[in-house]
Amino acid sequence: MEARINIIKRNVLVLNQTYEPLHICDVKRAIVLILEEKATLVKSFDHQVLRTVCEHFEIPSVIRIHKYVKVGRWEAVLNKPNIFRRDNFTCQYCGAQNVPLTIDHIVPKVHGGPDSWTNLVTACIACNNKKGNRNLVESGMVLRNKPIKPHKIHTLQRFAESPINEWRPYLFLD
């Protein structure tokens, strides 16, 4: 029974009519969309089938909705989990992983630094304390990666921490 529950909760990539990635849903929602003829199966998980008393369904990995959905301007939410995810849970000063992490303002708030995607980075506690309320030049510290505002594709790639192989062409990873 546990294996079936896990299959139902698996992630499915949902594509717009134009094959543009829209969002991610679970297998149950994907099968409902297919049964309601609102979506078509594009890719399935190899040799995996969900059986009912009367029918069996391929487990979808990628589906495409039939009607075009006009997507408005998409904005990633600026919050701690999303900054950690963007920075791959890695200190942007020393590269440390698997340590307690904080958020650091590159230009400190006391010097007018905004809360923005390009001014906030993940830092370990030691590096954050070392930098303090100084800017990068004053502290002598260097960023490993320039912080950027995430794009929708980037966010979908990160959501599935190791993107499923069937998704790679639709997330522009190939």
Image (cartoon, rainbow, N blue to C red):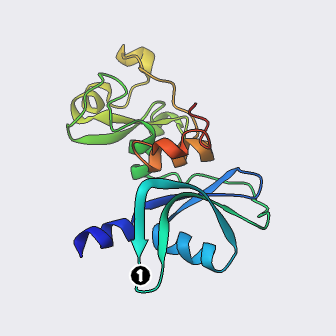
Residue 46 located left or right of residue 169: left
Picture residue at 64% right of the left edge, 53% below the top: 75
Picture residue at 24% right of the left edge, 76% below the top: 1
Residue 142 vs residue 25, the one in the foreground: 25
- What amino acid type should be assigned to the residue bearing mark 1? Thr
Is any part of residue 60 visible from this angle? Answer: yes
Q: Is residue 149 above or below residue 106?
A: below
Q: Secondary structure at mark 1?
A: loop
Residue 51 vs residue 1, the one in the foreground: 51
Question: Which quarter of the figure is the C terminus placed in?
Answer: top right
Residue density around tag 1, few if under 14, some if 14–19, many if 20 or more, within 10 Å: few
What is the x, y in percent for residue 156?
Answer: 53, 49
What is the x, y in percent for residue 102?
Answer: 31, 42
Picture residue at 25% right of the left edge, 32% below the top: 97
Residue 119 vs residue 50, the one in the foreground: 50
The part of the image, by quadrant, that contains residue 143 is top left
Is any part of residue 115 visible from this angle? Answer: no
